[in-house]
Amino acid sequence: MKPQAAPLVVRSVLREAFAQLRAAGVPSHTLAAELLLMHALARDRTWIYAHPEEEISAPNAERFFGLISRRAAGEPTQHLTGKQEFWGLEFEVTPDVLIPRPETEHVIEVALDRLAVREIRAGRRQPLSGEGLRIADVGTGSGCIAIALAKALPRATLFAMDISEAALAVARRNAERHGVCDRMLFFQSNLLEDLSVPRPHAANALPNPSPTAIYRCDALPHGNPLSFGVPQPATGHSPFRFDLIASNPPYVGRREAATLMREVREHEPEIALYGGEEGYELYADLIAQSAKYLLPGGILVLELGHNSLPAVQPLLDASTWTKVNVTNDLAGIPRVLSAERS
């Protein structure tokens, strides 16, 4: 009589997953295995560690080890679970968007701090609600920056822009998830360059006769919905002016591609990763366009690549920009460059 196989329990499948991912050289293999088991079982971490001897059904174990195999082959954990936490919020992520990173939270911190300081200088009431503010997130991807700012500033209007229609669809679903659709507009644009002549696109596009995709994620109103925080465009001129522009633009150099982790190089969208051969080529256009679309005293907040500060900071010339500041991340790397429009 064949001996019965030992039952599959939480402790044993986790131990096996740790070993498989460690052997494959997966970074943070313990965390990856935990997250994938939580996803496969639809349980949280507390439950998993409170029930180490809980039996796992064969279908659930098969599903879990299928995810482990894919992670060992290089697929990011976030693509396997379909989510990533950012600024205390859970965001849907897909291969169409950059996975939100913890260092990008510094963009939110700097944006909120600079807006608060500007309000204090102007003698306006605190705390900051964002009333009357128009904020643009350029290269929105999953929408994490725009949505985090929308949650922090409950009376601001947010404009989320991306060159990728697929990314905008993800951002819009995240806006729905977090209940900020009523204060957001989504634009398909290459940086800010298409704002001067927007055009409608897709079934949910707003009926506007100009060239950038402009659409909302809730039910479209009748008539001309540009009254939603956006004045009627004058022919040949953009109506869009912002109090703050934030961006985490593509800033990895193509010459660095071979040094990237496999998870990044093979699975995240190139259009969101690479900013040119050196990595900082997009900043000149982004800064020039921001100068055009920011109101006087408006704030620009940019995430930087690990070595891009020397190339980017000189682009903020004194005739156009003031109060230039650099913020380091927790590793001491210059991560955020911010300034005010003169």
Image (tube, helix red, strand yellow):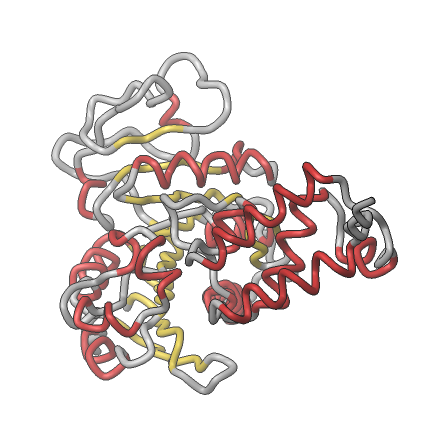
Q: Residue at x 31, y 51 (%)?
A: 269
Residue 40 in picture, x, y percent from top left: 66, 44
- Residue 153, how many percent across, how many down? 57, 51
Q: Residue furthest front?
A: 1
Q: Residue at x 47, y 42 (%)?
A: 157
Q: Is 227 left, or right, of 44 in this rendering?
A: left
Residue depicted at 39% across the width and 54% down the height: 98
Q: Nearer the viewer, residue 1 or 24?
A: 1
Residue 230 spot, x, y in % from top left: 36, 34
**Which residue is outermost to the bottom?**
332
Name the quarter where the C terminus is drawn: bottom left
Name the foreground residue: 209 vs 216. 216
Hey, which residue is sitting farthest top in the picture? 222
Total numbered circles: 0
Q: Quadrant of the N terminus?
A: top right
Compared with 297, 162 (above or below) is: above
Q: Position of residue 289 (x, y in %)?
A: 20, 56
Q: Left of 306 or right of it: where is 109? A: right
Residue 131 visible? The answer is no
Which of these two is toward me, 320 or 278? 278
In the depicted view, which residue is nearer to us: 216 or 53? 53
Query: Is 278 situated left or right of 342 in this image?
Result: left
For the point 26% across and 67% down, which residue is it?
Answer: 252
Above or below for 204 versus 228: above
Q: Quadrant of residue 163?
A: top left
- Position of 200 relative to 102 (above/below): above
For residue 157, say whether it is visible.
yes
